[in-house]
Amino acid sequence: MEIKKKDIRALTKEQLRDFFENQGDKAFRGNQVYEWLWQKSAHTFEDMTNVSKETRQMLKANFVINHIKVDTMQRSSDGTVKNAVRLHDGLIVESVLIPTKTRTTACVSSQVGCSLDCKFCATARLKRMRNLNPDEIYDQVVAIDNESRLYHNRPLSNIVFMGMGEPLMNYNNVIKAIDKITSSEGLGMSPKRIVVSTSGVPKMIKKMADDDVKFKLAVSLHSAIDEVRTSIMPFNATFPLNDLREALQYWYAKTKNRITYEYVVWDGINDNRKDVDALVEFCKFAPSKVNLIEYNPIDDGEFQQANSKAIDLYVKILEHNNITVTVRRSRGKDIDAACGQLANKS
Ligand code: SF4
């Protein structure tokens, strides 16, 4: 019977050093291999050219490197790139490179499918199959960094966890991936350039505050009225707005970081004055920023972007109440890479 080999990237640096010591080798060999695995993103043991052939063979006999593979890559007319990424077990997730004049942002996935059921989201139609491992999240970022250098002549500048899945439902692996992304032994990116976007899991928002994380938080709010929010994000019935607000108050008290809300205005759903007033009221407890995001209809067209009059009303009233507001045009629409469109269709 063939023994299933362990993914070497599941080992910490210390465990790798111990492994070499137990093999009668020098512990520093673990550092060398660790550097190949993370900083240099080696895909195979053969790539590790400063490691002896015998050691590489010994590693190959004991471990595998479960590297992701970019199965298909699509480029939009606006420069957006969408990767369909194949995982070691054949499952597929998507990640997106979003270029603007001043930055290139990676939008990465944290789960295969999603266990939540937001009515407007294409990913919600895929069953949640499993959480991504830290290395699978890290590899998506590396692949997009390479594409950013290739197509835009600059390294990746920002990361948003806004792809497939609810990142706070895969908290431990997301944190481990961010640790690697920000570590000097990984990509060395500043945590301030990373945004974890959640649909709002109160318990996990409090945990993030307790863990003293350094990255930024964004909340997909879309309505500050329980009834409306539950109709478009049914899990709101379990985690109602009061619980969410209380968790965000806790977050703000601990971190003093401004809270960003992602918000889509839909025709006939949340485009009335009462919706705007509720949002203003909800934002009051802490410095807030609202990103009004353009919506990209998914197949059945049940949700349609509200007209510009409704958007203007939101902007006017939010500004009047000293709440920072931006209107975000969506990108990569022609390749289904825009917000809420990731559904493994490529
Ligand atoms: S919007 Fe996010 S949390 Fe909601 S179903 Fe889609 S991927 Fe999941």
Image: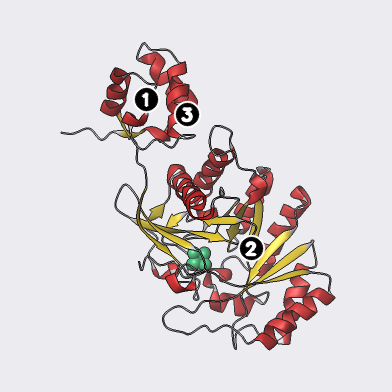
Q: Position of residue 123 (x, y in %)?
A: 44, 67
**Horizontal and vertical percent for residue 63?**
31, 31
The type of residue carrying mark 3 is Glu
Q: Earlier in the sequence, mark 2 or mark 3?
A: 3
Q: Name the residue located 40 percent from the left edge and 67 percent from the top edge.
A: 343
As measured in the structure, the alpha-carbon distance from the residue carrying label 2 to the one carrying label 3 is: 35 Å
Q: Quadrant of the N terminus?
A: top left
Marks 1 and 2 sit apart, C-alpha to C-alpha, by 44 Å
> Residue at 46% of width from left, 34% of height from top?
40
182 or 210: nearer the eye?
182
Left or right side of 342 for 243 = right
Give the labeled residue for mark 2: 219
**Which secondary structure, mark 3?**
helix
Callout 1: helix, strand or loop?
loop
Q: Residue 116, relative to residue 89: is it above or below?
A: below
Q: Which mark is residue 119?
A: none
For mark 3, what is the residue? 35
Q: Nearer the viewer, residue 205 or 50?
A: 50
| Tag 2–tag 3 contact (CB < 8 Å) | no
Whether residues under marks 1 and 2 lie with C-beta atoms below 8 angstroms apart, the answer is: no
Q: Amino acid at mark 2?
A: Val
Q: Is residue 141 left or right of residue 200?
A: left
Residue drawn at x 59%, y 40% as measured from the top left: 182
Task: Give the labeled residue for mark 1.
Answer: 49
x then y, percent, for residue 110: 48, 54
- Of the residues tagged 2 and 3, which is closer to the observer? 3
Residue type (three-letter) at the residue carrying disc 1: Thr
Q: Viewed as shown, does residue 252 lie left or right of 1?
A: right
Q: Is mark 2 within 8 Å of ligand 1?
A: no
Residue 199 location, quadrant: bottom right
